[in-house]
Image: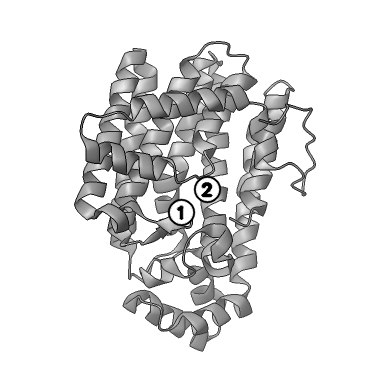
Amino acid sequence: MLTPKILRFTKGRFNVTLEELYALIGPDMKAVDSVIRNRLYSEVVLVRQVAEYIISSGGKRMRPALVLLAAGALGYQGKRHQEMAAVVEFIHTATLLHDDVVDESSLRRGRNTANAMFGNAASVLVGDFLYSRAFQMMVEVGDMRIMRVLSDATNVIAEGEVLQLMNCHDADVDEARYLQVLRFKTAKLFEAAAQLGAILGQATPEVERALTAYGMHLGTAFQLVDDVLDYSGDEGDTGKHLGDDLAEGKPTLPLIHVMLNGTPEQAACVRRAIEEGGRDDFAAVLDAIRASGALEHTRQQAAKEAEAAREAIQCLRDSNYKKALLQLTLFAVERNH
């Protein structure tokens, strides 16, 4: 584990690794891992196998880290933030298990998806187990506000999944509809994670609203960059197949930008690719994306969301935790995986 150091915040350049950011919460992250391992236990062998497979496959752990950093920024000294961070990771993992079944994905984090290894039925059911285990842990905390935040977030995420399903192969999806899916499906759990830290830290209503807004904007920036990486990332870095979104007929912001700003031929090519799905037109779509500046536009939108996240928490007192939260916005935008 790295030794915590004074973090430098340099706007416009990411100069601290994710590992260095997490060094500040190193002991807490270790404790969260321990909670996750202990609470994954089930007498049903297949539940243990699938849950352990997906949990051990890595990931950035940004959502549980958000709970810890937000609570730390408010001087929280207890242990409940570790339990709540584990709950957030369980909810996130459940959504991944379900997501990969819906999307028929075969690769995540550079490994076969759980559904590719164990089948769709097992993945869905273990996802349900993780959701229910998360709710058991929430009840044990005995705080109605925490339960409301997490139950509302879980409900909104489910709505986001359905909205995305409805948008697939629909080339008429505009930026507003796309952003609604993004905020429901991805940003909502970032928002809830930051809000949980605020509640545990007994924040004032103003500070709680600030951290909640921070989480929402951070999650939005994170997903916008994910959509960029689907057309520009290195599969060795992202752990996913390039062009997965196109194959599934998902109208993400780079594609929407081409249809609005590209040539008629480029717009028609993208429209056809969304409506038909698959990878047959991937090379032509990628050329249109590059020629129209769609990736640059999407990164600019992500940068605006990151800036909004930084602005939201200016009310926090200065601390290493605040600096880490600020640096996290740069990582979200400037990462390559």
Residue 176 at x, y percent in the picture: 45, 57
Specify the amino acid type for callout 2.
Thr
**Which quadrant of the figure has residue 133?**
top left
Circles 1, 2 touching at the beta carbon (< 8 Å): yes
Q: Residue at x 70, y 43 (%)?
A: 17
Q: Residue at x 57, y 49 (%)?
A: 221
Q: Is residue 21 left or right of residue 186?
A: right
Q: In the rendered image of this protein, does residue 333 appear above or below residue 297?
A: above
Is disc 1 surrounded by few (<14), some (14 to 19) or many (20+) residues within 10 Å?
some
- Local secondary structure at mark 1: helix
| Residue 4 visible somewhere in the drawing | yes
Q: Residue at x 66, y 46 (%)?
A: 331
Q: In the rendered image of this protein, does residue 219 appear above or below residue 99?
A: above
Q: Is residue 140 left or right of residue 297?
A: left
Q: In the rendered image of this protein, does residue 310 appear above or below residue 4?
A: below
| Foreground disc of the pair 1, 2 | 2
Q: Residue at x 56, y 16 (%)?
A: 203
Label 2, on which residue?
A: 220
Residue 241 at x, y percent in the picture: 46, 66
Q: In the rendered image of this protein, does residue 290 appear above or below residue 179?
A: below
Label 1, on which residue?
A: 179
Q: CA distance from mark 1 to mark 2?
A: 8 Å
Q: Residue pushed farthest bottom?
A: 265
- Local secondary structure at mark 2: helix
Mark before the other along the chain sequence, 1 or 2: 1
Q: Give the camera-side residue of 325 and 266.
A: 325
